[in-house]
Image (cartoon, grey):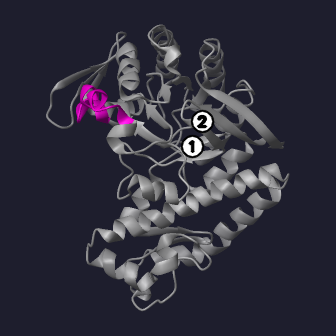
C-alpha cells in the first residue's frame, strides 16, 4: 500500500475523511504547517504536536541545496533528522520553478536552477525530484511540475501542462511503491477551465494516489480562483484526496472545504506570526499597535493555546517590539493553534452534518470583526 484515503462523512460537497499513510492515519480536512527546511519556523516538533499538527510539509528544492538529501539520508532520513515522527509531505520543487523564475531555465529534461545560496547550477529532473524525496523518506511525494505565473498566455499554459504530464510519467517509472510512500499529481492550467479539464484528464489517467490543485493563489483574481477550484474538484476522482496548494487564510480554508478539498498547506499563519499579525475568530490583530501596550487580555478570550493561557497582549507586544525571539514562538503557537483548531471544527461539523451552519458562523464572525480588527491592527 502507498497512500490510502477513506471518506467518513459528507455534508454537501464537504467531506471528512482519513489519509492512511505508512506512519499512521491523518484526519481530513487537514492543514499542514510548512517546514520548508525541515523545521516549522520558530517551533519545535513538540510545539507543533501540542497545537494539533498531524502532518507537516517540507521542500525538496531547499533540502537538496542545504544540507543535501544524501546528508539527511545518511543520518536516518528526514523524520529522524528533524525529530518528527508524524507523516511528512514533500513538495517536489515545482513551486520554486515559479518563485525563483529569474534563477531557472526550463527544458524538456527538467529544470536548471542557479542556486539562490551560492550561484551554483542545480539540476532537477522529474526522476531526480522523486529520487530526492525517496532519499529524504517522504511519506507523500509530489511530481515535478511547472507552476505558471498568473496571466500566462494560453499557449504557455497548454505547453506547460502537457510537459507536466510527460514529467509525471517519468516520475512514476522511478517511484518505489514498495517503500509505502504515496505519490500525488498536480493539476495546472491557470484560470482557463478548459485547460484545467485537460490537465485533469491527462494527470488522472496515470492512476496516482491523489491530486493537487496547483497554480492558484499566485496573483489571479480571487473570484477566478474559486471558479477554478469548484469546477476542477468536481472532475477529480471522488475516492482520492484533493490537495489545494498554498492556500491558508481562514476564510479560504472554510470555503475550499465546502467545495470538497481535503488537504492544505500555506506559510500564512507562521509568516504572519513573525510579522506580529495574530489570527482570531473575529479577524486579525497587529500586536505592534500601541493600543495593546497595557492590554491584560490574551490574544483571544477562550483560546486554549499555551500563549493565550499564559501571556497578555501587552507582554506579546513588548516581546515583539523588543525583538525578543520568544515573540516569534508564542505568536506562531497561537496562529497555528487557531488554524488547526478551525480544521478540527470543520471536521466535526461535517461529521455532524452541520457544515453549512458552522461555515456561516465562522465567515460572519471574521467579516464582522475584520473591520474593527484591521482598523486597530495596522496603524502602528
The residue lying toward the viewer, choosing from 151 and 359, is: 359
Mark 1 crowd level (few <14, some 14–19, many ≥20, 10 Å Cα) = many
Which residue is located at x 47 percent, y 57 percent? Answer: 269
Which residue in the protein does label 1 denote?
264
Q: What stretch is highlighted in magenta?
A: 62-78
Residue 288 seen: yes
Pointers 2 and 1 in contact (CB under 8 A)?
Answer: yes
Q: Earlier in the sequence, mark 2 or mark 1?
A: 2
Is 183 included in the stretch rendered in magenta?
no
Mark 2 crowd level (few <14, some 14–19, many ≥20, 10 Å Cα) = many
User: Relative to 49, is 345 on the left or the right?
Assistant: right
Depicted 362 relative to depicted 69: above or below: below
The residue lying toward the viewer, choosing from 172 and 176, is: 176
**Residue 286: percent from the left, percent from the top?**
44, 74
Is 63 included in the stretch rendered in magenta?
yes
The residue lying toward the viewer, choosing from 189 and 141, is: 141
User: Relative to 71, is 269 on the left or the right?
Assistant: right
Which residue is located at x 36 percent, y 48 percent? Answer: 39
**Residue 355: percent from the left, percent from the top?**
79, 53
Which residue is located at x 32 percent, y 74 percent? Answer: 320
Q: Where the N terminus falls, by quadrant?
A: top right
Residue 37 seen: no
Dividing the picture into quadrants, the one containing residue 188 is: top right
Dividing the picture into quadrants, the one containing residue 125 is: top left
In whole angstroms, how far apart are the C-alphas of marks 2 and 1?
6 Å
**Residue 92: percent from the left, percent from the top?**
41, 27
Q: Residue 243 carries which label?
A: 2
Amino acid at each position: 500500500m502507498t497512500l490510502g484515503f477513506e471518506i467518513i462523512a459528507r455534508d454537501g460537497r464537504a467531506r471528512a475523511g482519513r489519509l492512511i499513510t505508512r506512519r499512521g492515519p491523518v484526519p481530513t480536512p487537514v492543514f499542514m504547517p510548512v517546514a520548508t527546511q525541515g523545521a516549522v519556523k520558530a517551533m519545535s516538533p513538540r510545539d507543533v504536536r501540542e497545537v494539533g499538527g498531524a502532518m507537516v510539509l517540507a521542500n525538496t528544492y531547499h533540502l537538496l541545496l542545504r544540507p543535501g538529501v544524501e546528508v539527511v539520508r545518511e543520518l536516518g532520513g528526514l523524520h529522524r533528522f528533524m525529530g518528527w515522527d508524524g507523516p511528512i509531505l514533500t513538495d517536489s520543487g515545482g513551486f520554486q520553478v515559479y518563485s525563483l523564475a529569474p534563477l531557472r531555465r526550463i527544458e524538456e529534461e527538467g529544470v536548471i536552477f542557479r542556486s539562490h545560496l551560492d550561484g551554483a547550477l542545480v539540476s532537477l529532473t522529474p526522476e531526480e525530484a522523486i529520487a530526492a524525496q525517496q532519499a529524504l523518506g517522504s511519506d507523500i511525494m509530489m511530481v515535478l511540475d511547472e507552476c505558471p505565473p498568473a496571466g500566462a498566455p494560453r499557449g504557455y499554459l497548454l505547453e506547460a501542462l502537457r510537459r507536466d504530464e510527460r514529467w509525471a510519467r517519468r516520475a512514476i517509472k522511478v517511484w518505489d511503491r514498495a517503500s509505502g510512500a504515496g505519490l500525488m499529481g498536480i493539476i495546472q492550467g491557470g484560470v482557463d477551465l478548459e485547460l484545467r479539464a485537460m490537465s485533469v484528464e491527462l494527470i488522472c489517467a496515470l492512476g496516482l494516489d491523489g491530486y493537487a490543485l496547483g497554480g492558484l493563489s499566485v496573483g489571479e483574481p480571487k473570484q477566478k480562483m474559486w471558479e477554478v477550484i469548484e469546477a476542477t474538484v468536481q472532475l477529480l476522482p471522488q475516492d482520492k484526496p484533493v490537495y489545494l496548494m498554498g492556500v491558508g487564510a481562514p476564510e479560504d480554508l472554510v470555503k475550499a472545504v465546502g467545495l470538497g478539498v481535503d488537504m492544505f498547506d500555506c506559510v500564512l499563519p507562521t509568516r504572519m506570526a513573525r510579522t506580529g499579525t495574530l489570527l482570531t475568530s473575529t479577524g486579525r490583530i497587529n500586536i505592534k499597535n500601541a493600543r495593546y501596550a497595557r492590554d491584560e487580555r490574551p490574544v483571544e478570550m477562550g483560546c486554549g493555546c499555551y500563549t493565550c493561557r499564559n501571556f497578555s497582549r501587552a507582554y506579546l507586544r513588548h516581546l515583539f517590539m523588543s525583538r525578543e525571539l520568544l515573540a516569534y514562538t508564542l505568536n506562531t503557537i497561537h496562529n497555528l493553534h487557531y488554524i488547526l483548531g478551525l480544521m478540527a471544527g470543520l471536521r466535526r461539523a461535517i461529521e455532524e452534518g452541520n457544515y453549512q451552519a458552522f461555515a456561516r458562523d465562522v465567515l460572519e464572525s471574521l467579516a464582522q470583526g475584520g473591520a474593527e480588527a484591521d482598523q486597530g491592527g495596522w496603524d502602528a
